[in-house]
Amino acid sequence: MSGDVCPKCGVAIVPGYVRCPKCHFVLPPVRRPRSSIAPSGTAVEERRAPIAAIVMGLAALGVVVAAYFLFRGGGPKPEQPPPVSDQPPAMPSSPSPGPSPTPTPNPSAPSAQAPSGPSAESLAVELQRALDHQRLWSRVEVAGAVVEITSQSCSDPAIKPVIDAAATRLKAAGTSRLRCRDESGTVVFTRDL
């Protein structure tokens, strides 16, 4: 017999009884650990993971990740240069006996006649986006004065209006010819801009 007794009359009770065999008092349910039967027929106690430990572990991990993102790049900051003033530096006021020198033009400086519009490369990127938008998947590159389009859609009639829309700007950017070739390298058409 086990150590279970009836709480009303004190009679020893075998585990599993619902009522006391002497006074018929309804016995409280006995909490016992759950068990499952293993394939070998042996009863095995089930173990559950402690939920509180898992929650605390996840909270600690969250704190570590938050601290990493908060404090990363916490090294010394580069020193900021002093602000530049809009006023020209003061020149010493000493009289010069000779004529003032005239500035000589710098040959490496960009001339005033350089094109001020977008470059041919940036226009090629825009053309590629326009073609992709029309689902005419292409690769557009600039090689000197030639715009190279590589696409399986070169023979598609929908490609011509997209090229026509970009032709004027490409010509203004310094390109003179457009060539469309398929993926195998065969030139489908060439046109002057």
Image: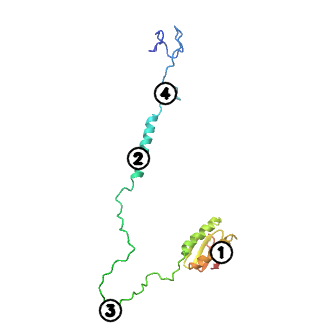
| Three-letter residue code for mark 2 | Val
Question: Where does label 4 land, which residue?
Answer: 44
Callout 2 touching callout 1 (CB < 8 Å): no
Check the image and tell me how it is coloured.
rainbow
Which mark identifies residue 64? Answer: 2
| Three-letter residue code for mark 4 | Val
Residue 122 seen in the current view: yes
Give the percent coordinates (x, y) of residue 129.
Answer: 60, 67
Question: Where does label 1 land, which residue?
Answer: 164
Residue 139 seen in the current view: no
Distance CA(mark 1)–CA(mark 4): 79 Å
Q: Secondary structure at mark 2?
A: helix
Above or below: residue 160 compared with residue 32: below
Q: Which is in the foreground here, disc 4 or disc 2? A: 2
* Label 4 crowd (10 A; few <14 / some 14-19 / many >=20): few
Q: Quadrant of residue 56?
A: top left
Q: Which is in the foreground here, disc 1 or disc 4? A: 1
Give the percent coordinates (x, y) of residue 94.
Answer: 29, 85
Give the percent coordinates (x, y) of residue 99.
Answer: 35, 91
